[in-house]
């Protein structure tokens, strides 16, 4: 699952960097028949959801490996918030809410579509940081590493870049 997390970060980052942020509704309206643009947006929706789901599943599994009982995902989040892996339960839930408000292919209010994707773009940094912290947690606490290093270097570069950017912008409390 650690390699899957790294892979999710890699591909979400790639999809996000194919676009100019923040998105503007006017631009989406003007390019509403641009298949490449809307394929990129669909990929961002899918990859954002996949990253959050994979992180959630990996956190649950890691608790089983460590002998912790977690009968609800809220308990999983609480444990990982206390350990510093998850920034906050509220941040996790905000990302979940943004992802669940996925822009539908049939939405015609391009300002709403742009707002949705801008929210996902902002929330992805929290997921990247959580992924970085979780991989480190697994390595140091559970002595578990990704099965292969196929995505390790890129994952480290992406998560390091986003952590440094957040600190420069003053949006990183750490």
Image (cartoon, rainbow, N blue to C red):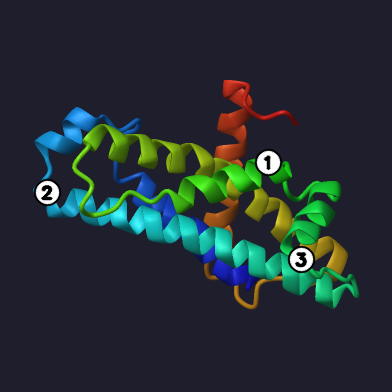
Q: Residue at x 73, y 42 (%)?
A: 88
Q: What is the x, y in percent for residue 68?
A: 89, 70
Horizontal side of residue 103 vs 167, given as left or right: left
Per the image, label 1 sits on a secondary structure element best described as helix
Closer to us: mark 1 or mark 2?
1
Pinpoint residue 105: horizontal percent, then vertical percent. Answer: 23, 54
What residue is at 11 percent from the left and 48 percent from the top? 34
Determine crowd level at label 1: few under 14, some 14-19, many 20+ residues with C-alpha closer than 10 A: few
Quarter of the picture holding the C terminus = top right
Q: Quadrant of residue 77?
A: bottom right
In terms of secondary structure, where does tag 2 sit? loop
Q: CA distance from mark 1 to mark 2?
A: 35 Å
Q: Nearer the viewer, residue 89 or 136?
A: 89
Can you identify the residue that label 2 sits on? 34
Q: Which residue is mark 1?
A: 90
In depth, the one of 142 and 22 nearer the eye is 22
């Amino acid at each position: 699952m650690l390699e899957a997390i790294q892979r999710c970060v890699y591909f979400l980052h790639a999809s996000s960097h194919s676009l100019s942020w923040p998105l503007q509704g006017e631009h989406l309206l003007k390019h509403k028949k641009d298949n490449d643009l809307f394929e990129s947006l669909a990929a961002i929706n899918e990859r954002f959801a996949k990253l959050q789901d994979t992180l959630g599943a990996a956190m649950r599994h890691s608790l089983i490996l460590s002998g912790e009982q977690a009968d609800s995902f809220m308990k999983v989040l609480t444990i990982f918030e206390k350990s510093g892996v998850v920034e906050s339960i509220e941040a996790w839930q905000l990302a979940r809410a943004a992802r669940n408000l996925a822009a539908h292919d049939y939405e015609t209010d391009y300002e709403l579509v742009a707002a949705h994707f801008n929210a996902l773009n902002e929330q992805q940094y929290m997921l990247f940081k959580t992924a970085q912290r979780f991989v480190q947690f697994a390595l140091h606490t559970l002595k578990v590493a990704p099965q292969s290093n196929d995505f390790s270097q890129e994952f480290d570069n992406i998560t390091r870049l986003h952590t440094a950017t957040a600190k420069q912008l003053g949006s990183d409390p750490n």
